[in-house]
Image (cartoon, grey):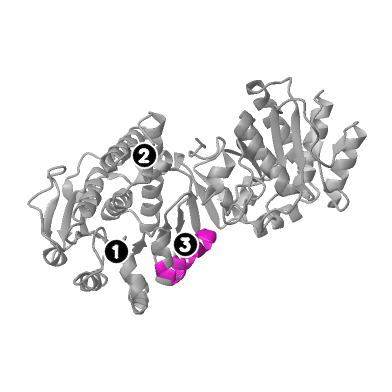
Amino acid sequence: MPSFAGPANATPLSPLLTVPQLRSVEKRYAEASLMEKAGAAAFRLIESLLPKTSADGSIVILCGPGNNGGDGLTLARLLREQGFSPCVIAPVTDALPPDADEALAKFLDRGGILHTTLPDLPAPPALIVDAIFGIGLNRAPDPPFDGLIRWVNDTHTAHRTPVVSLDIPSGLAGDTGVAWPPTVRATVTLSFIALKPGLLTLDGPDCCGELRFSTLDIPPADLAANADAQALHRRFIETHLPVVMRRRFRNVHKGSFGCLAVLGGASGMSGAPLLAGRAAARLGAGKVRVGFLGDTPLFDPGCPELMLHSAQTLLRMPHDAWAIGCGLGTSPPAPDILMAALPFDAPVLLDADALTLLGHHPEWVARVAERHAPTVLTPHPAEAACLLQCSTDEIQRHRPQAARDIARRYRAHTVLKGCGSIIADPAGSWVINTTGNPALAFGGSGDVLAGMVGALLAQGVEASQALRYAVCLHGAAADALVEKKEGPLGVLSEDIIRSAARLVNEAIAL
């Protein structure tokens, strides 16, 4: 299974650079021998991987027609200088960029042999290096490169041959995570200069395998200054969350941790708000009240600490934060309930059916955007499509932009859920979360997340931070279960809730 915990050498928040931002950095460091440094970084990685493979087998390096191919040629030269004899395949070399052309000349000067097509190999290679396409690709690979990519994937599948992609798996879009068919499925991806959004969202994690990166000696402060986005890693919980958890102090009581209202539970859907309420209770909310549009249960046997009311009763009671939409439904009186809650002078999280209702009533956009207290939206791709009046496919092909568009349009702190959830705020900053795995792909997972965010809002955590903490923690809880071999199969809501509480308690104790 691919690594979901983020790059091994990542800080809690790593700068994310889009393709235009990376091009700007590359231009300013044009005299810094970036290609030579990229080849050296790749050589160090290959050197560390070789003991895990057959050192006697061949190393195949596939080079494309741009600077990514130049990185591969530089690596090939360095390998030759250390006694290796890599098999280098470069179908197109007649119009290489200047740096790549120089790398080719140096490789040939060291006695390197260049193949324009895949030669007959006496045995499966010990290692394949993908240096075909970099971040500039924005369409499906053309022949003959598409055939080489299929060979890479077929060889990896048939012989478990490790595949190392330089900078980005060939075929993957650097800004969006769209995998143009065919796309290399790497074992390890070594990203240069900075992480790219496409490595972390949509198809990116499935194509990258284990993700590592090298700044190529560019100062981190310079990279951060050029980035308006960051990657959110699991260490963020350990280093940031304890600061806002008041349970570090002893002179407290239940009122110190706020009161959250969870509003939903139409007929036949009472489980959704109960799951959100249970998650909120486990994540530290001092009091949790759950309001139902349908019949109100007498109590929750799984968490009798929850206080259960009718939706109408709940609306008349003051709360520190609201989580609305879990099992709300879209039939009357759900629209009226939602409209009654929007004017509240407290943070309001809108999830699930509340988001669908917003999408069905574009005239309500202004009411949400004009709220004085913070608003948090937690759509999955289909709900995001409803909010932006487009197709789910359009959302998925432009995930970072979609999250930012929703945040701006509704003036709301937004998480676009999915592989590499994207968190955007109304001011334009955004992050991609790197925690989480398929253990979260079950009904009720989103309700748990809503309750976690609501709990932090009720405890007074600022909306943008509450969303980041909760999303990162939600994924990390699933990762912790997989690490203990308790997932990804068979994980349910209570497992995630307990795992998340355990991680928070561990972080507070550090």
Label 3, on which residue? Answer: 403
Task: Tell me, yes or no, whether the two marked residues, 3 and 1, touch with CB atoms within 8 Å.
Answer: no
Res 74 label? none
- Identify residue type, mark 3: Ala
Quarter of the rendering occupied by the C terminus? top left
Residue 353, numbered circle: 1
- Under mark 1, the amino acid is Asp
Give the residues in magenta: 386-408
Q: Is residue 387 magenta?
A: yes
Does the magenta stretch mainly form a helix, a strand or a loop?
helix
* Residue 127: x %, y % from top left: 69, 30
**Looking at the image, can residue 372 be seen?**
no
Residue 179 vertical placement versus 482 (above, below): below
Looking at the picture, which amino acid does disc 2 mark?
Ala
Q: Would you say 252 lies left or right of 37 here? A: left
The residue wearing badge 2 is 477
> Along the horizontal axis of the image, is 74 left or right of 272?
right
Tell me the CA gap for discs 3 and 2: 23 Å
The quarter of the picture where residue 305 lies is top left
- Quarter of the image where one finds residue 115: top right
Q: Is residue 226 left or right of residue 353?
A: right
Residue 21's spot in the image, x, y percent?
65, 57
Residue under the point 40% across and 40% down: 476
| 378 or 62: nearer the viewer | 62
